[in-house]
Image (cartoon, rainbow, N blue to C red):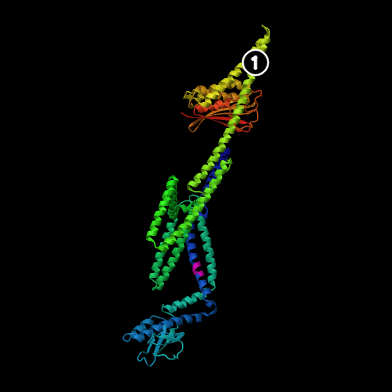
């Protein structure tokens, strides 16, 4: 009982480990990098935009601090405030004096409206004696502060001016204004804004650089993260296209630019409302940064996917123009050069008539200069290329068939002429090579045929002579007769092979194509050559499928092909090795292969091996029977049956492969 319990525990533990391994594998599969997380990318996007806004604002503030000749570092804060308050008080005083001087009926009310709801404690205006009944004073009831400013205005007749001195020499009329600001700024006006702004910049004049540096680092880090995470999704580690990447990139850039221009036009329209203008400007900056970052992410995704430039309107337009130009050139190239020349000259002539008819003397002179400027390089180019063609054609005429015309830089018919000259040179070289090869083959053919015929014929003559010299009833006559018979058969077989080779090569051999089962013929060949292979010390291994493989062939001719190839294996294969014969369907073809290991080194190419009277051992006097016509006959018979025979030699490995179309 205890043993059963132990076995149950042991059998349960591996299952637990397997489940744990599967769960851990699932967790590993689900645990993707942070760049694939959508919440991480959204968070990084927002942080990057915010840090970029802060970085730009602080950098702009630092540039402002440095461009103001370091006033925020050298001038005390109170002195800076006094300068700003004085400029604002001067503007208020000028407006009040202008209203009091020009407005008699509602002067007091209008003047109070100018400084009402401002952080001004009091304001007094004292005009000179030549401007009676204009003096004015205002007291808001607010506690007076330390900021008090005095201004003097003069020359009211010609547009008054402000002077810092109370003594105006030669002035027609004057007005002295005293402005006292409140001790505490309770109203929301420019004084309070300037005070708050001054306090802010003085508190940030050193911290700005630190914030700018930190925000810039965060922006760069966020930008790098977003570029790496662009196109990454939780479902795959490879970049994937989204809906946005299918939109042409230049259209996205154009759309973003139009939206920014729209907001810019709105900001221009609301310049008079400073707070709204500031809000819109801030929104525009955030929008531009977010849009620019989104475009960069889209571009990064397109680059990862490859060929991003192809998904642009500009590329498609330029590609269409290029295709149209190529089509035009192609159509132009099909027109004969004579008619092309006539059309070109006629077009130039008509264009000249239009220019001369509608232009003046100056434009005609400019056109003539431009025409000469364009036509001269073309004429020089054509002359240079014609000279090159003339030189190369002379080289070909002198017999330098290996010379090639460099067609780089040539166009249209000039390039065609260069290619034709190159083709002529190649064709002549091939013709000379083929002719040399043909002459060599004829010489070798005569030599080989003479040798192969001479050998049995000499034996026949010699043994016939010996028979005539032997007395009647001699036993040697029988022996000599056997030699005569054997050599006669050899001579007959050689002549038959020569005739068959000649007929097969010229196509005069009768071939009757009919549906033929390759399996049956190979099985017949296997049975025929099994004993012959054993006698030669070889092992025949055949791989023939059970499924019938049918082709259109002449059974007798196909058997002759197989017979020649297997007979070659018996003659030239290394004893103690295997000979492989296989049949398979490969696509729409039946492929029959014969492979064996050669006894002698195959220091010859496959093409040479299939020539007539060529043998693998390169010797006509070796002990191996054969005349070197077997492979040549096999190839010719295969081609007559719409097949193809190829030889492959790899070291000592010999392989013959036949391919026939299936039916």
What residue would you read off at disc 1?
Answer: 461
- The quadrant of the image that shows the N terminus is top right
Tell me if mark 1 has few (under 14), some (14-19) or many (20+) residues whose alpha carbon lies within 10 angstroms of its own.
few
**Callout 1 secondary element:** helix
Inspect this view and state whether residue 625 appears: no
Number of marks in picture: 1
Tell me if residue 225 comes above or below residue 270 in the rendering.
Answer: above
Q: Is residue 133 left or right of residue 207?
A: left
| Relative image position of residue 557 (x, y in whole percent) | 52, 23
The image quadrant that residue 155 belongs to is bottom left
Side of 468 relative to 239 (left or right): right
Identity of the residue furthest to the left in this view: 105
Residue 111 is at least partly visible in this image: yes
Q: Nearer the viewer, residue 329 or 363?
A: 363
Q: Which of the two residues, 29 or 213, is positioned nearer the viewer here?
A: 213
In the image, residue 58 lies in the stretch drawn in magenta: yes
Q: Give the x, y percent position of residue 541.
A: 58, 26
The question of residue 54 being in magenta is answered with no
- Give the camera-side residue of 157 and 334: 334
Question: Where's residue 161, x and y in %?
Answer: 42, 85
User: Residue at left 49%, top 69%?
Assistant: 57
Instruction: Please report the residue visible at 65 percent of the width from the left and 30 percent of the height from the top.
Output: 601
Q: Which residues are magenta?
A: 55-59
Can you give x and y, in whole percent of width and height, for residue 9 in the image? 56, 41
Residue ranking furthest to the bottom: 129
Q: Is most of the magenta stretch helix, strand or loop?
A: helix
């Amino acid at each position: 009982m205890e043993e059963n319990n132990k076995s149950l525990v042991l059998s349960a533990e591996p299952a637990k480990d397997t489940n744990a391994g599967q769960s851990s594998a699932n967790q590993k599969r689900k645990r993707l990098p942070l760049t694939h997380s959508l919440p991480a990318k959204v968070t990084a996007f927002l942080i990057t935009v915010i840090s970029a806004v802060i970085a730009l604002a602080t950098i702009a503030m630092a540039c402002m601090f440095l461009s103001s000749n370091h006033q925020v570092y050298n001038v005390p804060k109170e002195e800076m405030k006094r300068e700003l308050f004085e400029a604002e008080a001067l503007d208020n005083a000028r407006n009040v004096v202008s209203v009091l001087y020009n407005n008699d009926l509602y002067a007091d009310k209008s003047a109070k409206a100018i400084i009402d709801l401002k952080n001004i404690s009091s304001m007094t205006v004292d005009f000179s004696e030549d401007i009676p009944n204009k003096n004015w004073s205002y007291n808001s009831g607010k506690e007076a502060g330390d900021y008090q400013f005095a201004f003097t205005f003069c020359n009211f007749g010609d547009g008054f001016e402000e002077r810092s001195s109370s003594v105006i020499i030669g002035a027609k009329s004057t007005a002295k204004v005293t402005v006292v600001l409140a001790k505490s700024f309770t109203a929301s006006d420019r004084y309070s804004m300037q005070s708050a702004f001054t306090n802010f910049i003085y508190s940030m004049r050193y911290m700005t650089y630190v914030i700018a540096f930190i925000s810039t680092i965060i922006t760069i880090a966020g930008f790098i993260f977003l570029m790496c995470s662009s196109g990454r999704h939780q479902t795959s580690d490879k970049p994937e296209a989204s809906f946005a990447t299918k939109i042409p990139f230049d259209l996205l850039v154009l759309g973003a630019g139009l939206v920014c221009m729209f907001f810019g036009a709105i900001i221009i329209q609301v310049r008079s409302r400073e707070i709204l203008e500031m809000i819109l400007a801030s929104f525009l900056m955030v929008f531009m940064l977010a849009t620019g970052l989104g475009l960069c992410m889209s571009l990064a995704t397109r680059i990862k996917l490859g060929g991003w430039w192809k998904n642009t309107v500009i590329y498609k337009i330029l590609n269409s123009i290029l295709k149209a130009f190529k089509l035009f050139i192609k159509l132009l190239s099909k027109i004969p050069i004579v008619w092309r020349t006539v059309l070109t000259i006629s077009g130039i002539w008509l264009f000249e008539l239009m220019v001369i008819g509608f232009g003046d003397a100056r434009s005609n002179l400019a056109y003539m200069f431009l025409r000469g400027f364009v036509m001269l390089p073309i004429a020089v180019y054509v002359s240079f290329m014609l000279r090159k063609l003339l030189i190369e054609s002379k080289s070909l005429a002198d017999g330098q068939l290996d010379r090639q015309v460099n067609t780089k830089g040539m166009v249209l018919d000039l390039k065609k002429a260069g290619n034709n000259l190159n083709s002529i040179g190649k064709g002549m070289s091939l013709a000379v090579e083929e002719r040399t090869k043909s002459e060599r083959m004829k010489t070798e053919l005569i030599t080989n045929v003479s040798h192969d015929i001479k050998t049995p014929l000499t034996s026949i003559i010699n043994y016939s002579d010996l028979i005539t010299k032997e007395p009647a009833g001699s036993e040697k006559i029988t022996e000599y007769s056997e030699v005569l018979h054997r050599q006669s058969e050899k001579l007959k077989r050689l002549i038959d092979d020569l005739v068959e080779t000649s007929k097969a090569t010229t196509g005069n051999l009768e071939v009757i194509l009919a549906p033929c089962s390759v399996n049956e013929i190979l099985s017949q060949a296997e049975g025929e050559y099994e004993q012959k292979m054993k006698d030669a010390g070889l092992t025949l291994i055949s791989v023939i499928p059970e499924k019938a493989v049918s082709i259109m062939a002449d059974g007798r001719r196909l058997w002759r092909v197989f017979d020649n190839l297997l007979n070659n294996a018996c003659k030239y294969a290394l004893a103690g090795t295997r000979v492989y014969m296989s049949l398979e369907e490969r696509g729409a073809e039946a492929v029959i292969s014969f492979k064996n290991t050669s006894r002698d080194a195959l220091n010859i190419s496959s093409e040479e091996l299939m020539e007539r009277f060529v043998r693998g051992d390169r010797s006509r006097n070796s002990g191996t029977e054969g005349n070197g016509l077997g492979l040549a006959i096999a190839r010719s018979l295969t081609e007559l049956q719409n097949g193809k025979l190829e030889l492959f030699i790899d070291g000592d490995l010999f392989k013959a492969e036949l391919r026939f179309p299936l039916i």
